[in-house]
């Protein structure tokens, strides 16, 4: 590779070629002082008869490209320059409207997430579409994504690995969908998530580890869900009780089931409301103890019953023998 500078000979500062000294000479008019006899034709254009024609001095031709000063770039330097140049990012999908750092794919009738998104996207809006399922790795590599909106879709299922590669995400909107179940594995990759909107879905309860998988969570919206206010809602109630400052729209967290608690605020429950749930729930250690002691107690009860039965039979046999010893005639008849 050659790096060339546009500096050529015979060019002035304005880029025009300066005429040579020979071109400045003008032919002397005939009859002037510079004109001599028949053998001289110094300034005339037509040679005089008998005179030896003067040879025209031609300037040496300059090859094309030689007029510019060139320098060769070493191969290692060229390779380094190629490595430093970032690869071009994918073009904006046809179904989206893109601006620097933002892709708006709302209201486009999409049934899945567009894959060819610019890698520098920081805000992705996919609301008001027909997306029903987010499968494994539903999103391309978007290391700078901060906001993701999937509101007003038809989401029913989110795979545990659907959000891989979105570790920089800070705000996630999943409101106005058809979600009924969420697993902790779904939110494990979102280590930077600060705002989560789960409002207007079909959630009846949340597994204990769902909210525990979001260490940076600062704002949570759970309104307009058909919450089942039974023992299954105890993990959610405990989290809400310890993180009241993180819950927005507390007054809209209402029970739907059972009927006698319809529209009852979840945040109004107290410890006494779940006392029976806490008494019947067993820890893992209690389950292990139960499975170890249970079989032994069963076997011991069998041995105990057999032993007691043997004692009763033995007692009756002794009682009969003593009765026969006192009244031998009666025992013979029998």
Image: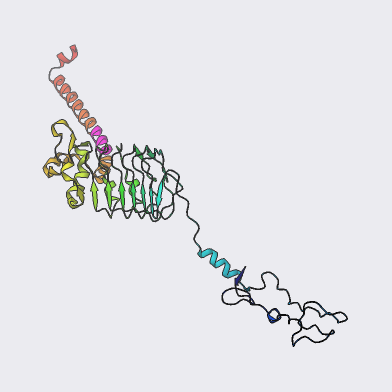
Image location (x, y in percent) of residue 301: 23, 34
In percent of width and height, residue 14 lies at: 56, 74
In-front residue for pair 259/25: 25
Above or below for 203 versus 36: above
Q: Residue furthest right?
A: 50
Quadrant of the rendered image containing residue 230: top left
Display coloring:
rainbow
Observer-nearest of 297 and 120: 120
Q: Is residue 48 above or below residue 266?
A: below
What range is drawn magenta here? 294-303
The answer, for residue 278, to whether it is visible in the render is no
Which residue is outermost to the front?
31
Residue 296 lies in the magenta stretch: yes
**Direction from residue 25 to residue 188 in the image, left or right:** left
Q: Is residue 96 visible?
A: yes
- The majority secondary structure of the magenta stretch comes to helix
Which of the 4 image quadrants contains residue 168? bottom left
Percent coordinates x, y for residue 39 in the rendering: 85, 85
Residue for point 15% across, 39% down? 276
In front of the other: 136 or 130: 130
Q: Quadrant of the C terminus?
A: top left
x then y, percent, for residue 309 = 21, 28
Q: Is residue 138 above or below residue 88?
A: above
């Amino acid at each position: 590779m050659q790096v060339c500078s546009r500096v050529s000979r015979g060019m002035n500062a304005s880029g025009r070629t300066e005429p040579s000294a020979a071109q400045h000479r003008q032919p002397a008019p005939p009859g002037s002082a510079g004109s001599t006899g028949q053998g001289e034709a110094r300034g005339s254009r037509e040679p005089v008869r008998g005179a030896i024609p003067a040879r025209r001095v031609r300037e040496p031709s300059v090859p094309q490209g030689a007029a510019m000063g060139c320098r060769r770039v070493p191969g290692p330097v060229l390779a380094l320059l190629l490595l430093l140049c970032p690869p071009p990012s994918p073009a904006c999908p046809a179904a989206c409207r893109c601006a620097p750092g933002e892709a708006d794919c709302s209201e486009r009738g999409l049934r899945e997430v567009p894959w060819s998104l610019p890698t520098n996207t920081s805000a992705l809006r996919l609301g008001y579409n027909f997306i029903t399922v987010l499968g494994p790795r539903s999103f391309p590599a978007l290391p700078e994504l901060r906001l993701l909106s999937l509101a007003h879709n038809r989401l029913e299922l989110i795979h545990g690995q659907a959000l891989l590669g979105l570790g920089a995400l800070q705000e996630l909107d999943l409101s106005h969908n058809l979600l009924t179940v969420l697993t902790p594995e779904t939110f494990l990759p979102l280590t930077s998530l600060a705002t989560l909107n789960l409002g207007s879905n079909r959630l009846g309860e949340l597994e204990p580890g769902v909210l525990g998988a979001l260490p940076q969570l600062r704002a949570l919206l759970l309104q307009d869900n058909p919450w089942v206010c039974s023992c299954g809602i105890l993990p959610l109630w405990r989290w809400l009780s310890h993180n009241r400052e993180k819950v927005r729209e507390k007054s809209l967290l209402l029970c739907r089931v059972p009927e006698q608690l319809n529209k009852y605020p979840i945040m109004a429950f107290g410890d006494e409301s779940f006392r029976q749930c806490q008494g019947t729930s067993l820890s893992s250690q209690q389950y292990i103890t139960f499975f170890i002691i249970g079989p032994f107690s069963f076997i011991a009860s069998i041995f105990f019953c057999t032993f007691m039965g043997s004692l009763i039979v033995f007692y009756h046999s002794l009682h009969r023998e003593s009765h026969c010893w006192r009244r031998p005639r009666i025992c013979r008849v029998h």
